[in-house]
């Protein structure tokens, strides 16, 4: 490949003496030649690239998997650059259309994508009307083998699990319908086995997000626990991750891995304010009257327990509920970390563990469409988040956020040490998200932040990137590969221009 040359001409500037006599000036042009560096793979072998992971690998965006999003998936963007230095074809398990969603024998099991409704994310069908979800795990699965083995919803240990792509196991909760689309005539093959069977020369692995994300998106209510840090493969994160890397590299494959962002920094948890409730004077008075008995019970408990140190004045103040006329009333939430007053004195067993949210509590994004609705359509005062407290699934308490932070740090230590021992490239996705959440990242002419809709990095579900966000990630992966394998995607000017990638998809895209 011939080197391209860019010539810049610098012309001297005439200078004058104090008496306006011209100085001798060299008017000959100065020629500066800048050579563009030729792209090279360094020591990396991209001839057979296979990607493993979850929804972030699959190309999930706007709460769905659909063709336009898949075309902008992180590994597909990488494969396009790898093809310039020896990379081969890259096959993805494409869905049938741009509607999104998933069906099983004609029955919908995953809804279509979200779209922008003018003020925020709304379901596609609320804009264009009813649609038929045509991507059906029973009727029309694609044919592999596939280079993109990203399985939305997968946790670390799921990549090792036999039968995770077996249609018969879906109704038992033991299989993932997205992986069912890939397994074909080998329904009990694991994701890892499917990857190794292709003898990859280079792989990417980004897994572990769901090992904490499921707990977070369920508000820490216990229905989707954090994966144990330690345990054998298939149980603990350390055993599972170690087995993945050991198996993938056993045949000499090179690769790049990424660590786990602290998920509480994503817009799914930072968009809904803790105090979104508007009330007029009359309604505020009515709600306060409804909580009068509860507040009185707290006062009685405090008086009875005074001096014991078991129920402090600070907790009494935090648990006392009060609304006022205005637009910034805090929602009422359940908080299991509050003192169980009934356990101290049975006389107070009827007092629930309630308080109003503070700025330290994080409300999940779906709460935005739940707060303010009526629990009883016939009772105008039965407002969810006001008269009816928000249950645990809608809120991440500070204690739950701390659990997530501790687990994330432990998982990342495992990822980083395992990657270092195997000589793999490492992407610090955790630091990347922190930058997006704290001022943003400038790439070319664009600055991306973690704000929903306006930040350009995150799609309408508040969890997954936009196409522009995936392009930003692809650049970080290439930079990490450069640093480890001596390629020069960055130095040769072969990083992606994030401005070439969209931040949303039209509702008309089908």
Image (cartoon, helix red, strand yellow):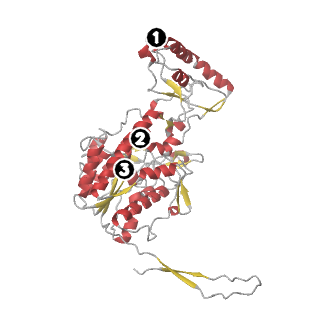
Residue drawn at point x = 54 percent, y = 38 percent: 368
| Res. 143 visible in picture | yes
Q: Residues within 10 Å of mark 3 (few under 14, many from 20)?
A: many
Q: Quadrant of the N terminus?
A: bottom left
Mark 2 lies on residue = 405
Of 179 and 75, nearer the camera is: 75
Quadrant housing residue 358: top right
Identify residue for label 3: 54
Picture coordinates of residue 68 (x, y %)? Answer: 45, 58
At mark 2, the secondary structure is helix
The relative height of residue 351 versus residue 400 in the rendered view (above or below) is above
Q: Quadrant of residue 171?
A: top left
Q: Residue at x 34, y 70 (%)?
A: 42
What residue is disc 1 on?
347
Q: CA distance from mark 2 to mark 3?
A: 20 Å
Using the image as rendered, state which of residue 344 and residue 225 is in the foreground: 344
């Amino acid at each position: 490949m011939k080197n391209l040359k860019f010539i810049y001409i610098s012309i001297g500037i005439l200078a004058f003496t104090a008496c306006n006599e011209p100085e001798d000036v060299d008017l000959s042009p100065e020629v500066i030649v800048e050579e563009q560096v030729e792209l090279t793979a360094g020591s990396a072998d991209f001839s057979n690239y296979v990607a493993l992971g979850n929804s972030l690998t699959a190309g999930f965006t706007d709460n769905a998997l659909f063709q336009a999003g898949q075309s902008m998936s992180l590994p597909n963007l990488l494969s396009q650059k790898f093809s310039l230095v020896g990379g081969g074809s890259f096959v993805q398990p494409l869905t049938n259309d741009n509607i999104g969603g998933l069906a099983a024998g004609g029955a919908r099991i995953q809804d279509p994508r979200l779209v922008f409704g003018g003020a925020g994310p709304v379901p596609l069908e609320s804009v264009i009307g009813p649609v038929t979800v045509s991507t059906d795990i029973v009727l029309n699965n694609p044919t592999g083998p596939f280079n993109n083995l990203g399985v939305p919803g997968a946790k670390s240990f799921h990549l090792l699990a036999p039968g995770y792509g077996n249609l018969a196991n879906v109704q038992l909760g033991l299989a993932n319908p997205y992986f069912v689309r890939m397994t074909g005539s080998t329904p009990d093959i694991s994701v890892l086995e499917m990857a190794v069977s292709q003898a990859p020369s280079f792989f990417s692995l980004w897994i572990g997000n769901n090992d904490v994300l499921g707990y977070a998106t369920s508000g820490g209510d216990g229905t989707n626990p954090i994966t144990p840090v330690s345990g054998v493969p298939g149980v603990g994160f350390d055993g599972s991750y170690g087995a993945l890397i050991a198996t993938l590299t056993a045949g000499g494959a090179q690769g790049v891995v990424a660590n786990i962002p602290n998920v509480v920094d994503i817009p799914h948890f930072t968009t809904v304010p803790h105090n979104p409730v508007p009330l007029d004077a009359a309604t505020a008075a009515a709600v306060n009257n409804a909580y009068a008995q509860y507040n009185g019970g707290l006062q009685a408990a405090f008086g009875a327990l005074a001096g014991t140190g078991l129920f402090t004045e600070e907790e009494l103040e935090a648990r006392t509920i009060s609304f006022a006329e205005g637009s910034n009333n805090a929602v009422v939430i359940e908080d299991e970390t509050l003192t169980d007053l009934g356990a101290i004195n049975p006389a107070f067993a009827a007092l629930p563990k309630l308080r109003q949210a503070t700025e330290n509590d994080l409300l999940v994004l779906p709460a935005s469409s739940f707060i303010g609705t009526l629990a009883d359509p016939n009772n105008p005062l039965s407002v969810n988040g006001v008269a009816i407290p928000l249950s645990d699934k809608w809120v991440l308490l500070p204690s739950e956020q701390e659990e997530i932070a501790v687990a994330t740090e432990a998982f990342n230590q495992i990822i980083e040490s395992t990657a270092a021992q195997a000589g793999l490239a490492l992407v610090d996705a955790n630091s990347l998200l922190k930058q997006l959440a704290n001022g943003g990242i400038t790439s070319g002419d664009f600055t991306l932040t973690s704000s929903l809709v306006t930040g350009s990095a995150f799609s309408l579900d508040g969890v997954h990137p936009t196409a522009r966000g995936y392009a930003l990630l692809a650049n970080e992966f290439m930079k990490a590969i450069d640093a480890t394998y001596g390629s020069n995607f960055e130095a040769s000017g072969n990083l992606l221009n994030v401005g070439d990638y969209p931040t949303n998809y039209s509702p008309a895209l089908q």
